[in-house]
C-alpha cells in the first residue's frame, strides 16, 4: 500500500497523529469521510451487524414461530436452556464432530491437491499449463447448485455414470452391486461425494494462487539448494514452503472459513431433512429455523452462535495476518 | 516480497506478467535444459498428470452439457455413452418455452435474477465507491475500526445469520409497512449489503493508486470536487469498479440460502438457482431438463469469469466471500 496517504504507523489513524495531507484544505476536512462511509455503514449495520447481535439474544430465549404472531408475547429469556440442551444432546455432538471432520478433510485435500497442481503448472511449459488452467477455471466458475446437481447425476443409482462404470469393472477389483448402490443414504458415502464436489470447486483457486506465488520466488534460491544437494522434496520444504508461508496461511484460513459453512451442496445431495446423520452445522441451523415444525428460532440461533464462534476464532488468525500485511492501514 | 503482498489493487492486476519479467532469463534457463529429446521423454509423466488434472476439472462440466443434449432414451439407460448418439435440443426447448413451475416460465425467472443481481451490484458499487474514497483518501478517527468491521463482517457466514436476518426483515417489514419477504425487495437489500465489504476493499487499492497530484492539479485548474471525481478519479478507477462489480454479480447470481428463506412459496419471484432447486425437488428424475437448466445457470458466470479470472486470485486472497 505504498500509495496510500502517508501511513505514519499502525496507529496512524489516531486523531493526534493524523498526517497533514488534508489539513491543507481545512474546508473539506471535518465531516467528509464520515459522510462518505455513512450510507455503507448504515446498510451494513441494519442488514448484517444488527442480526449478529440479535442472533446472540435469540439463542438465550425461548423463541418459536408462535412468538412471531402479532398478539403473542415476544421471545423470553430461558436461562441458557438451549446451550444446556446442546451440551447433553448426542445428535448435536455427532453433527459437530462430522462438521469438523468433513471440513478438515475438505481443507486438507484441497490444500494438498491445489499445491501439487500449482507446482505441476509451474513445471509445465506455458502453453500446456495455460490449457490446464483454463480447464480448471471451468470447475471453479461452475455455480455451487449446478455442480451439486451434476455430481448427484453422476452418482445416481441405476443410471449414474460412476455407478455404471463401477459395475462394469471386474468384481474381484471393486466388488459387486454398484449399479443399485445409493450413495446418498449413508453419511460416509454422502460426505465423500460432498467432499469431492467441494474439492473439485476449490482446488483451482489454491493451485492458481500457489502458481502466482511460485513465480515470485527467485530462481537463484533453487540453484543454491541444488548445489547443496537438495532434491525436489527438500527444496520444497526448505525454499518454497518458507517463502510462501504467508500465502499458505491465508489460503488455509480462507478454505476453513468457506468449508465450515457449506450448505447449498449438502441441500442438493441430501435432498431432504429426514436423515439427521447427514447433517452439518449449517444444515442443522436451517432445519431448526425453517424445516422443523414448529420452527425453533432459539435453538437454531444457539447452534448458529456455536458456528460463528468457530468461524471467528479462525477469523482472528486471519485478521492477525491482515494487520501484519498492513491491510488495515 | 510475498504473493499476498502484491494482492492490493492495480499492482496485482497482472501478477503473472510482472513475475515472469522479474524472473527474466534466470527463470528460463531451467527450461532450456529440457529441450533435448531425452528430457522431453522424462517430462512425459508431468504432461500426463497435467492431462489428468484437466480431465478431472472439465469432465463434470462436459457431462452436464452432454446430458442436456441427450435424448431421453439415452439418459434413462444403463448404457451411458460419452457422446450423444442423436443430439437434441428438446430439453432446452422444454426449459426455455415450457413452464418450469406451473404458471411461470424461464424468462420470468431470468428477469427476476437479472433484476435483483444487476440492481444490487449497481447500488453496491455506488455505495462502495464512496466508502472506498473515504478509506483511501482520508485519515479519520474510525477508519481502522471501519476496515476491521468490514473484514469481520465478510467472514461471518450467511448460513449462521440466516434465522436472525429473516426475523430482522420480518420486523423491518412490520415497521415500514412494506413487505420485504416473499418478493425481491428484501433480497435486493441483502445482496447489496453483502457485496459492500469485498467491493470496498477491492476499490480502495484502486483509488489509492490514483496519484493525488493529478487531483490537485485539476483542483488548481478550477475543477470542483464533483468534476474531479467524475473526470479524474472515475476513469482511473473504472477497471477496478468493473472487476469488483463482476465479482459481486457472480456472488449474487449464485446466492441460494437467502433466496430460499426470503422467497418461500412466492414462486413468481423465484431467482434462477431457486427455480432449479424447486424443479429438481418436483421432477428429480428428469435429468435432461435439469442439466439444460444447470447449463443455462452456468453460462453467464463462465463468461464473466473469463473477464476477471486473473483478478479473481488477487481479489480472493484479499479476503472474500464464496458463493
Image (tube, coloured by chain):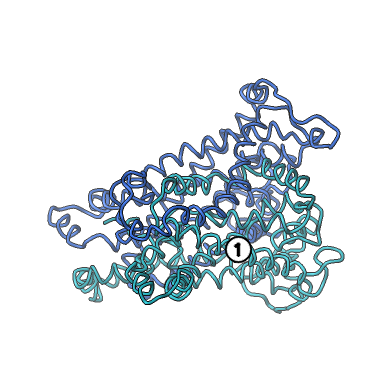
A131 left or right of A67 in image? left
Instruction: Give how far across and how far down residue B279 sits, in percent.
Output: 77, 60
Closer to the camera in the image, B25 or B37: B25
Instruction: Give how far across and how far down residue A296 sits, in percent.
Output: 74, 33
Report which residue position mark 1 lands on: B123
B192 left or right of A26 in image? right
Instruction: Give how far across and how far down residue B98 sits, in percent.
Output: 82, 72
Q: Is residue B72 visible?
A: no
Q: Is residue B83 above or below residue B163?
A: below
- Outermost residue on the front side: it is A27
Closer to the camera in the image, B271 or A121: B271
Figure colour of chain B:
cyan
A116 left or right of B275 in image? left
* Quadrant assignment, res A94: top right
Question: Secondary structure under badge 1?
Answer: helix
- Outermost residue on the left side: it is A227
Closer to the camera in the image, A56 or B302: A56
Q: Is residue A285 visible?
A: yes
> On what subunit does the disc labeled 1 rest?
B
Figure colour of chain A:
blue
Amino acid at each position: 500500500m505504498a500509495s496510500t496517504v502517508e501511513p505514519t504507523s499502525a496507529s496512524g489513524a489516531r486523531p493526534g497523529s493524523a498526517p497533514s495531507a488534508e489539513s491543507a484544505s481545512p474546508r473539506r476536512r471535518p465531516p467528509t469521510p464520515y459522510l462518505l462511509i455513512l450510507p455503507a455503514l448504515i446498510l451494513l449495520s441494519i442488514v448484517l451487524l444488527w442480526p449478529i447481535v440479535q442472533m446472540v439474544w435469540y439463542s438465550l430465549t425461548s423463541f418459536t414461530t408462535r412468538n412471531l404472531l402479532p398478539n403473542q408475547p415476544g421471545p423470553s429469556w430461558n436461562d441458557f436452556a438451549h446451550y444446556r440442551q446442546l451440551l447433553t444432546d448426542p445428535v448435536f455432538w455427532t453433527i459437530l464432530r462430522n462438521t469438523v471432520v468433513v471440513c478438515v478433510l475438505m481443507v486438507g485435500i484441497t490444500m494438498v491437491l491445489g499445491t501439487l497442481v500449482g507446482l505441476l503448472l509451474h513445471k509445465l511449459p506455458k502453453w500446456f499449463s495455460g490449457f490446464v488452467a483454463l480447464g480448471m477455471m471451468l470447475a471453479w466458475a461452475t455455480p455451487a447448485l449446478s455442480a451439486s446437481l451434476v455430481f448427484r447425476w453422476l452418482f445416481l443409482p441405476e443410471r449414474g455414470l460412476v455407478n455404471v462404470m463401477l459395475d462394469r469393472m471386474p468384481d474381484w477389483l471393486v466388488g459387486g452391486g454398484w449399479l443399485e448402490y445409493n450413495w446418498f443414504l449413508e453419511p460416509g458415502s454422502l460426505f465423500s461425494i460432498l467432499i469431492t464436489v467441494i474439492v473439485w470447486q476449490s482446488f483451482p483457486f489454491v493451485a492458481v494462487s500457489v502458481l502466482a506465488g511460485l513465480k515470485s520466488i527467485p530462481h537463484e534460491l533453487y540453484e543454491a539448494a541444488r548445489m547443496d544437494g537438495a532434491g525436489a522434496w527438500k527444496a520444497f520444504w526448505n525454499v518454497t514452503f518458507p517463502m510462501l508461508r504467508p500465502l499458505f496461511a491465508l489460503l488455509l484460513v480462507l478454505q476453513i472459513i468457506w468449508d465450515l459453512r457449506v450448505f447449498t451442496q449438502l441441500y442438493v445431495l441430501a435432498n431432504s431433512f429426514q436423515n439427521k446423520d447427514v447433517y452439518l452445522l449449517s444444515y442443522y441451523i436451517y432445519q431448526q429455523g425453517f424445516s422443523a415444525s414448529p420452527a425453533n428460532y432459539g435453538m437454531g440461533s444457539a447452534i448458529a452462535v456455536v458456528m460463528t464462534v468457530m468461524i471467528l476464532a479462525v477469523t482472528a488468525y486471519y485478521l492477525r495476518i491482515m494487520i501484519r500485511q498492513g491491510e488495515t492501514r | 516480497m510475498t504473493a499476498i503482498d502484491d494482492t492490493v489493487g492495480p499492482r496485482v492486476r497482472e501478477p503473472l506478467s510482472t513475475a515472469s519479467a522479474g524472473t527474466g532469463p534466470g527463470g528460463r534457463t531451467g527450461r532450456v535444459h529440457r529441450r533435448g529429446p531425452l528430457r522431453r521423454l522424462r517430462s512425459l509423466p508431468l504432461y500426463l498428470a497435467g492431462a489428468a488434472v484437466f480431465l478431472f476439472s472439465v469432465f463434470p462440466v462436459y457431462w452436464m452439457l452432454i446430458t442436456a443434449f441427450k435424448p431421453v432414451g439415452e439418459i434413462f439407460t444403463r448404457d451411458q455413452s460419452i457422446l450423444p448418439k442423436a443430439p437434441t435440443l428438446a430439453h432446452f426447448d422444454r426449459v426455455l418455452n415450457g413452464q418450469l413451475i406451473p404458471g411461470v416460465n424461464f424468462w420470468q425467472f431470468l428477469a427476476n435474477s437479472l433484476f435483483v443481481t444487476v440492481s444490487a451490484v449497481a447500488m453496491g458499487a455506488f455505495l462502495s465507491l464512496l466508502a472506498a474514497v473515504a478509506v483511501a483518501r482520508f485519515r479519520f478517527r474510525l477508519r481502522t475500526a471501519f476496515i476491521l468491521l468490514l473484514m469481520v463482517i465478510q467472514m461471518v457466514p450467511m448460513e449462521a445469520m440466516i434465522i436472525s436476518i429473516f426475523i430482522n426483515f420480518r420486523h423491518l417489514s412490520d415497521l415500514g409497512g412494506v413487505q420485504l419477504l416473499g418478493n425481491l425487495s428484501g433480497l435486493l437489500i441483502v445482496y447489496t449489503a453483502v457485496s459492500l465489504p469485498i467491493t470496498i476493499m477491492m476499490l480502495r487499492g484502486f483509488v489509492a493508486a490514483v496519484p493525488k497530484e493529478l487531483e490537485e492539479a485539476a483542483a488548481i485548474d478550477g475543477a470542483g470536487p464533483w468534476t474531479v471525481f467524475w473526470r479524474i478519479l472515475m476513469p482511473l478507477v473504472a477497471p477496478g469498479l468493473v472487476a469488483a462489480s463482476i465479482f459481486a454479480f457472480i456472488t449474487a447470481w449464485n446466492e441460494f440460502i437467502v433466496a430460499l428463506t426470503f422467497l418461500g412459496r412466492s414462486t413468481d419471484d423465484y431467482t434462477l438457482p431457486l427455480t432449479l432447486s424447486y424443479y429438481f425437488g418436483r421432477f428429480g428424475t428428469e435429468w435432461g431438463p435439469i442439466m439444460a437448466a444447470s447449463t443455462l445457470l452456468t453460462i453467464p458466470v463462465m463468461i464473466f469469469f473469463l473477464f476477471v479470472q486473473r483478478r479473481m486470485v488477487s481479489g480472493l486472497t484479499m479476503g472474500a466471500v464464496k458463493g
